[in-house]
Amino acid sequence: MITLTENADNADNPVLRRLIAAEIAQTGGRIPFARFMELALYAPEEGYYTSRVGLIGAKGDFYTAPHLTPAFGQLIARQLAEFWRRLGEPPKFQLVEMGAGQGLLASDILTHFYQQEKELWPGLSYTIVERSKSLQEGQRRRLLAVPDGATLLPKVSWRDLDEFEPGSVVGGCFSNELVDAFPVHLIQLVEGEWREVYVGLNPAGDFEEETGPLSTSSLATYFEAAHLDPTRYEEGYRTEINLAALDWMQQVAQVIAQGYILTIDYGYQAERRYHPRRQTGTLQTYNGHTVGDNPYLNVGHQDITAHIDFTALIKQGEAAGLKTEGFTTQMAFLGGLGIANLLLELSTSTKRPPKEVMAEYNALQRLINPTAMGNFGVLIQSKGVAAATAPLAGLSLSFI
Ligand SMILES: C[S@@+](CC[C@H](N)C(=O)[O-])C[C@H]1O[C@@H](n2cnc3c(N)ncnc32)[C@H](O)[C@@H]1O
């Protein structure tokens, strides 16, 4: 049995902590870790993502690519515009951004389309699928605050994924750092068998882990598919299983009639993701730009994430009728979309103050840094799209 208790510096949301403790008490004394993470991040109005707006960026807990530079959104927009062209320039083109955070990517993409894609713009609609109501409000405010906001906002609507008609989207569904934020099941090898990690309470009322039988047979199915054969792993090996990612993939595949799915996130293909040497898994917490590994601290005030298994998304997508267009790194993806030209333009720029040029150079460099964001995975899948002779621009260098 493992005990992970509060420490003296713990600064969690006491209402959320009580809410989780009450659910534990009401459900026989323990809940699967996945349920703990679900509540910690998304409990209505009290979870990490549902109770606040400014969690990303310099004043938040972590950075994402859109918070480094608008160039990220502009490069993504180039890829999305290529989707439109490959689809034969349909008069109505729908983009669906899933997990839009503070709305920076949306405002950068829409600004780019408004200014640079005059033919695509009239038929464009932009739907945001965002679980957190407080972030939805923040996204609306952000869109209104940008220079062309009053023109951009009418293009945007908010909708849950299960509110889309099946086979209704002609366009592209995309996300940046969404799937790593789904609640994961935690598993551990105990006496040669996979057991699930549950969260209970010790006599002092602190969260306490214990292992038990698998809470759902879907985990055993996943072990088979990902070749998580217990004999390959050492006693105590711990890792995360993102079952929510599979349901999500299936739902996204269903809503598309014709188009592409672009997924950017940290993670690897299964063999690397579940390598026997990755003994303690990939679960991480982010609080005030400090990375940690204890999800029971700062409950409701820190992000909890796990690296994603791209192989699972690929297989699930193919089972749901998607074609895998390719998988690459963010560095190669942005390379294919022309980030080198942006760097070149910057180095010959005489109009901007040197300080500003340096800041933009650093931001672009961070997007492609091979030891950080540059090593993120980029997966593109498609449905109902005619085969093309050349790869998509972002997949000029694909690893599958
Ligand atoms: C790590 S943030 C990334 C935000 C943004 N994409 C960015 O790059 O800055 C994860 C986002 O996904 C949202 N989210 C998590 N689960 C979701 C779900 N099932 N459906 C829609 N949005 C979700 C969170 O509320 C949050 O906005």
Image (tube, rainbow, N blue to C red):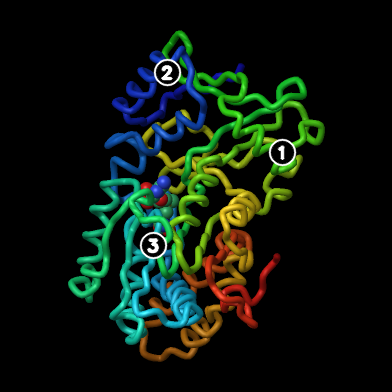
Q: Which of disc 1 and disc 2 is earlier in sequence?
A: 2
Between marks 1 and 3 in the image, the one whose residue lies nearer the viewer: 3
For label 2, the residue is 24
Q: Quadrant of residue 153?
A: bottom left
Q: Quadrant of the N terminus?
A: top right
The answer, for residue 58, to whether it is visible in the render is no
Q: Quadrant of the C terminus?
A: bottom right
* Marks 2 & 1, CB-CB < 8 Å contact: no
* Marks 1 & 3, CB-CB < 8 Å contact: no
Q: What kind of residue is marked 2?
A: Ile
Q: Is mark 1 within 8 Å of ligand 1?
A: no
Q: Secondary structure at mark 3?
A: loop
Alpha carbon of mark 3 to alpha carbon of mark 2: how far?
Answer: 40 Å
Query: Looking at the picture, does residue 24 appear above or below residue 303?
Result: above
Q: Residues within 10 Å of mark 1 (few under 14, many from 20)?
A: few
For label 1, the residue is 224
Q: Secondary structure at mark 2?
A: helix
Q: Which of disc 2 and disc 3 is earlier in sequence?
A: 2
Residue drawn at the location 38% of the way across and 51% of the way down: 161
Q: What kind of residue is marked 1?
A: Glu
Q: What kind of residue is marked 3?
A: Ser
* Count of numbered tags: 3
Q: Residues within 10 Å of mark 2 (few under 14, many from 20)?
A: many
For label 3, the residue is 168
Q: Which of disc 3 and disc 1 is earlier in sequence?
A: 3
Q: Secondary structure at mark 1?
A: helix
